[in-house]
Structure formats: structure tokens, C-alpha cells
Image (cartoon, rainbow, N blue to C red):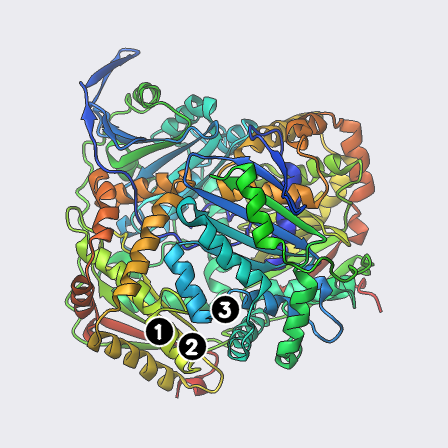
Amino acid sequence: MTRMLAVPFLFLGLAPLEAQTAILTASTDDARTFVQGNKTVTVSAPVRIGDDVTTFTLDNGMEVVVIEDHRAPVVVQMVWYRAGSADEKVGQSGVAHFLEHLLFKATDKLAPGEFSATVAANGGSDNAFTSYDYTAYFQRVAADRLPLMMEMESNRMENLRLSESDIETERNVIIEERAQRTDNNPGALAREQFMAAQYQNLRYGVPVIGWKHEMAELSLEDALAYYSLNYSPNNAILVVAGDVQPDEVMALAAQYYGVIPPESNLPPRLRPTEPPQTAPRRMTYTDPRVSQPYIVRSYLATERNTGDQKAAAALIYLSELLGGSPFTSALGKALQFDTQTAVYTNAGYDPSSLDTSTFSLSVVPSTGVSLSEAEAAMDKVVADFMAADIDPAALDRIKTQLNAQEIYALDNVQGRAQRYGAALTQGLTVQDVQDWPQILQDVTADDIKAAAAQVFDLNQSVTGWVVTEKEQAQ
Amino acid sequence: MIRFALTLCAAMVASVAHATVDIKQVTSPGGIKAWLVEEPGIPFAALEIRIRGGASLDLPGKRGATNLMMALIEEGAGDLDAQAFQTRREELAASYGFDTGDDVVAISAQFLTENRDAAVALLRDALIVPRFDQSAVDRVREQVLSNIAGDAKSPGAIASAAFDAAAFGDHPYGSSLAGTADSVTALTRDDIVIAHDNAITRDRLYVGAVGDITADELGTMLDELLGDLPAKGPALPADADFALMGGTTVIHYQTPQSVALFGHEGIERDDPDYFAAYILNEALGAGGFESRLMQEVREKRGLTYGVSTFLVSKFHADLVLGQVASANATVAQAIDVIKAEWARMAQDGMTQEELDRVKTYLTGAYPLRFDGNADIAGILVGMQMIGLPPEYVVNRNDMLNAVTLDDVNRVARELLRPENLHFVVVGEPEGLEQAAGAPE
């Protein structure tokens, strides 16, 4: 969910895979102290990682990551809160994202809209996004405008001033946003039902944008309650990436963020866990706006955990081997080349999640192929994969590509910033981010088979058929 | 969607300028020209190639041939069938992209320095000796037909198709470049071969390269990659007449939120007033939250999540376009507000303060676009296609700053024609009637 959709651009290049370069060659010196007005801010000793990443922590608990990229005089500032839709109160779905919109209204120092207007007046662009596990705000500006961006971003961490009229108008905007993203889109509506079936206890079963009936009731008090509990320096991560020096960022961070008191009542981030799933679940979503029937199957799957990322790394390979490329993956070969069963096949796995993730398979059958036939063919591909050895050449190609992704990823400084922000709000550490590429390179065929055996349990699955009319589901 | 994105890219380039990049003009030993920015910091290079013509070269009755042909380029070449070709590409960890626009085909590539020669050789085979195996034609045709079926149920695509058909009739701009289910079903392998011969030629080729490669290396590479292309393609189509009058077209479709596409004729990219029009569009509807339409329709009234306008300068037609989505019950009100703002800007123009604000944003935002090898390569190739010199990146902000309030407000009066604005609305809009305007 974002505050504003970007203009669509040409899709270029490979899909990004999660990872990060550089080998750990940490160097530390002493903690530093900054005086700001009548406050003293102490900053932990900076840790330098690889060529261009530096991290430190302010004494109010705010973590800071600096990524240097001096190719262009540009900087990206991102502030990530460890608070997303899965941290909302029951019955207030959508409030995390609603608050994200409201953060562009007035503060004690800024008039409504002045934040973005000021960014624009400095030639920059800004936006924000909300997910299950985090809410993040960012600006992209000329590097010498960083102090102003920090001044404004730190100001809205605790000084928001909302009015009832803001609430009414902006609530209409998010309901229109839901209409645009979800209610007007049968695929999105099906996915919403699907997630609700997959997660019965975790809040991942509730859409980030919110259920429409709960969105319509969101109040000023709801938004402010979420804000005062979750928006504080000890619940936030600052990532600054671009043409900056770590020392300069440290001094600015101490000046603007270091003086904000920590939230002493910050609750531990306790999430409910899924109960053991002991029966396969099935659903059929019918909507006349569906242009072509398709199948999605998803299984609960482990995610990257701190100090324990090996199973997630193996699942990355599993998704590539099963459905990464329509030309060379198991699903693609069997259903699109050896037979004409499908026009589209895919395997998907997102390793980045605070709580249990999912591993999914999807198939769009060819004309004349029924959903039952397509599902049987999909299941056979999985069974055949489990029965056969993994082709070492295929494994090597994935390793080569993951390695190359690390080089291509250096070209996108905002993408690098996002890796750290997402990881640190999803229970990982900077060290975990640094370790991930090597963990990916170390995955073996046995690891993949073991991870697959763990995941492919129909008792932990949901199978969804999405159809235009009921007859297609027979 | 692809066609829209390509057009937008060209429009975006116009807004870019005054960068800190050092553009070298390279001519290969074989005479192929390119623009290069050397960036040795990361061991890879990005290449963006555009060839004018694109889907507008589809022969009569063969709509969709160029689009299907470009989708087949990655499906095998020379000795390698589709799977062998992709296996080789994966071994090299290179990425290739092939796309079709109304007036252009786009070829994008990124490859590592360590295996550049092999990655370029593989791309060369894809462009020069594609196989177009019948099995690949049939398989990819099914994928295209699947997309066409999807467009038929997408409110945005339905609106675009109706607007284009009413505006441009029989000109290629009047129909989807993907073709229809019938036209695509009827395409043969021979049609694909002809589309390839016509669309991928040397005579209207543009290249932007950025990354870890020198001018000499690029020159050699260009001859290897593109030297064996046919020298000349067929004639380009004539300019398109814009036949859509002011009014409203309602297309009934059961969905909770109506989607509206609106617009009228625009301004040529090489018109002396283009910068004034560019500033005007920014203030009216392109400038995100600061634009008048976002302020009035979203921020003040909460009628939409997004409303925006674009100057669309195609090679054979120019448009001012906009889009908005609003609940069926409120879309009529959103459209009334848009019409009123269109008229207010045409009649009263903008204020000096607004002009200054837009200039500050546009001139400040420009260097931020030069970010990332592939993005910069795209900018370089876009500038060449619309005939801008390399110095444009240095002079552009000065040209933009030279626009006066009188210029902008004169252009507002000339360009913005509230009475010519046509809305195509897809959904079940309440209180909105079909109104005259579509030509007989």
C-alpha cells in the first residue's frame, strides 16, 4: 500500500532476489557524544561493514544504517517503523495504512501538505508504504538537502496534529484506494479470500488496506492510538543511502532524532502464531470479471529468522527450480513445453517476513484444459520433482544468477536501503543481511530436498480456484 | 499497457536535463551511432536500443504481428531452441528485455563485464537469426491471447481501447498493438518473419549505453551486435487525425469503481511552446500532490486515490490525457471538478507563485533522474529518438526557467480546450449520461 501509485514504467531486467554483497570486515572505534541544546546524545561506536555500509545506534534506541554510494549527488532517507498492519488492534484493520496517509497532514510546525510541498520545492520526491510488518517513509533529494528532510521527518515522529476533517476526507481516499487496488480487481479479491483461508490466527489473514467495513469506521482516536504507541525512536530504523559520509549522518541523526525521548511503554512485539494446520483447505472464488480461470496452491513455509536463514535460502532455490523460469523450471518444462497444459506457471516464495511465510504454486491452464486436470498435472510435477535428483547444472545456474544479482543490485541505492529497512523491521539484524548472500551460495541439493519435504504437506495448504462462472469449477 | 508506458517514457525524457553525466557520442567502425556514459564503478553495463516503427508497421490484416514477433525473440536463435537459449542466458546471468510500442520496438540488456562478449553474442543471435519455431509461435500466441482476454475485462484497458478507437479510427493508433483474438489467431510464421524483417532494421536505430565499457569496446560491440541487421525498413505511417470531439462516452461494466480516461489534442514535442505546456501540465495534473487536480479531487474532496494528466507526444499524434478512478456514486462529481479546473486554468492561467514553485521542482528534480545505469541508458536513447542534442542535459533547466508567466498562460488558453475534452467512463457511473461528441 502506498500513498500514491507511481507512474508505470517499462519492466526491465531480472526480478530482484533478496540478498546483499560484501564480506564482513568490521572496524570499530569509540562511542561518540553530541550535544544538542540542553540534551546530550550518545551514539554507539559505528560499525563499518564491507566497503560502504556503516551502522550505529542512538542512545534513545533508534538504529541507523548508512549506505554510501557516491556516483550521483543524491540521497535517500528512509524511516522504517517496526509496526505494520499485523500490529493493529483487532477490529481496526487498515489503521496502520490510514495513519501512513495522515502523516502527510499537519504537525505542530508543518501545515497540511507542507511536508510533501517542501520536498517538491527542493526538487525531491517522497512517498510512504505500509506492509504487514512495517510502515516506511522516504524522500529522495539532492544530498545537500538531507538536514531539512531529517528535520521534517523527525518532527512528524511525535508532533502530528490531526483534525476531524482530515479524518473524513482521507478515509474516503483510502476507501477509493481499496476500490482501485482490490474491489475493482477480481484477482486481488480472490487473493484476499485466499490469505484469510491460509492464516487463521496470524494477522496476515487480514488485508493491509483493511476490510472495507472496518475502514469505514476508523476514527481519529484509532489513528492517534496506533501513532502514540508505535511511532517512537526505539521502534524505528533510519536508513540513509547515497552521497553521504557516515560521520555527517551520525551528527545529523543525533541532532534531529537523538533528542526524541524513547517510548517507555513500547510493548513487546508478540504476535499470535498459527495453530497446527491439520487439514487441507480449498476455496473457489467466482467473479464474472475473471478473464481466465486459474489455480493457486499455497503452503505455510518458514521465513528468514535471525541466525537461522538456511531453510529460507533453500526455499529460494526450490521456487526457482520449480517455477522460476517458464523455459527451464520443472513446472514450465512439464506444463508449457512437454505438454500444452498451461499458458502460465509460477512458483513464489517470499523469505522476508516477521512470521510464517508461504510458498505458492500457480497455474493458468490452456484453453480446453480443466482446472482438475491442471491441478493433477501440477501435483504430478511436484511428486516427480521429489522423486528425482536435482540437476547439478540447474543448481549452478541459480547460484551464478544469485551471485550476479548482487552486482546488479549495487546499481540501485534505494533497493539496497530497502533490504536493510525490511530486514530490521522483520526480526533480522544487519549481520543477517550481510550473511544472506553466502548462505544462499552454500545451499546444497540435500538442503533443497529437505526444505521441500517440510513444505509440501497438503495438510498445511490452501488450494484456490478462481473462475468466471461456477461451471468452470466442476 | 506497454504502449502507454513507452509513450510516457518519451514524455519523461523531455523533463530531464542538466545532469552530472558525461555523454560521449560514439560511432562504431561500421557506422552505428550510440551515446555512452562510462561508469566503471560496478562491473556491468546496461544497453538500451530503440528502433522506430514498432507496431505501426503491422501490415493490413496483421494487427499484433510485431508484438507477437518481439515476444518470440527470446524463444530461440541459431542452433539453440527456446529452452537451450534461456539455459545459456541463465548461465551468463545476463538479462534481456524485448518490448513493442506504438512507434518503436525496445531492446534492453544488462550483462556482466566478465562475460560480456558471450552475452552480446547470444543477444546478437536473438536479433539477427531468431528461429520462430512453430511450437514457440503457437505457445506464445496462447499467452498473447490470454492477455487480450484479460484486457477485455480490465476497466482501464476497456477505456483506453474505446478512447483510441474513437480518436484515431483506422490509423494504427486506433487499435491495440496486441491485435484482436481473431487477428492474432490468424497470424502465421511467415507473418512473424515479415514483421521481423520490417521492425528490426539499421536505418532508424538508437542506442544508449551506460556502465563498465569504453567507447572503443562499445564500437566493436555495436558492429558485432547490430552490424548484420537489414539496412532499411518500410515507410512509416502518416500522421494520425484526431477525430474525437468533446463529450462523454459511458461503457457499462459491472464493477464498483468507475475508471475514466479523458483528453483532447496536445502539442508537438518540438513546438517552441513545449516547455510552457510542460510546466502547465505539471501544475494542472502531473505534479503529484501539488497539482491542482490532486488538490481539488483528492485532498479537498476525497473523491479519488489518484488523478493525473500527461502530455503524450507520439510520433504521429499529440495528446493531453488524464485518468481518474472514483466510486460509481461519485465519479460524476469528480468529472465535474476536473472540467471546472480545466476551464479555470484555460481562462485564468496560473499564478506567478505557482509557476515559480513548479519551476523549482522541475529543475531540482532533474538530476535525480540520472540514477542507475539502466535508467540513464533509457534517458540517452529517449533523447536521441526525439532529436535532442547531448548539450540538452546542460541547457534544459535554463530553457525551462526562461518560460514566463505570459508564455504559460497564453499556452493555457491555446492548449486547454474544456469544450473539446472527451471522457470515456467504464463502470456503472451514477448521474452520468452519454453526451454527444464521438464522431459519426
- Relative placement, left or right, of B97 versus A285 is right
Q: CA distance from mark 1 to mark 3?
A: 19 Å
Picture mark count: 3
Residue nearest the viewer, comparing B299 with A42: A42
The chain under label 2 reads A
Q: Nearer the viewer, mark 1 or mark 3?
A: 3
Question: In which image quadrant can residue B233 be found?
Answer: bottom right
Which residue is labeled 3 in the image?
Answer: B76
Which residue is labeled 2 in the image?
Answer: A336
User: Is there a contact, CB below 8 Å, between mark 2 and mark 1?
Assistant: yes
Residue at 48 percent of width and 79 percent of height: A468
The chain under label 3 reads B
Q: Position of residue A85 (x, y in %)?
A: 32, 50
User: Is there a contact, CB below 8 Å, between mark 1 and mark 3?
Assistant: no
Instruction: Please rate how many residues cluster around mark 2, counting C-alpha atoms within 10 Å: few if below 14, some from 14 to 19, many from 20.
Output: many
The N terminus of chain B, quarter of image: bottom right
Residue B179 appears in view: no
Question: In which image quadrant can residue A333 be found?
Answer: bottom left
Relative vertical location of residue A151 with respect to residue B232 in this rendering, above or below: above
> Element under label 2?
helix
Which residue is labeled 1 in the image?
Answer: A331
The chain under label 1 reads A
Instruction: Name the residue type under label 3.
Output: Gly
Instruction: Name the residue type under label 2.
Output: Gln
Q: Nearer the viewer, mark 2 or mark 3?
A: 3
Instruction: Name the residue type under label 1.
Output: Leu
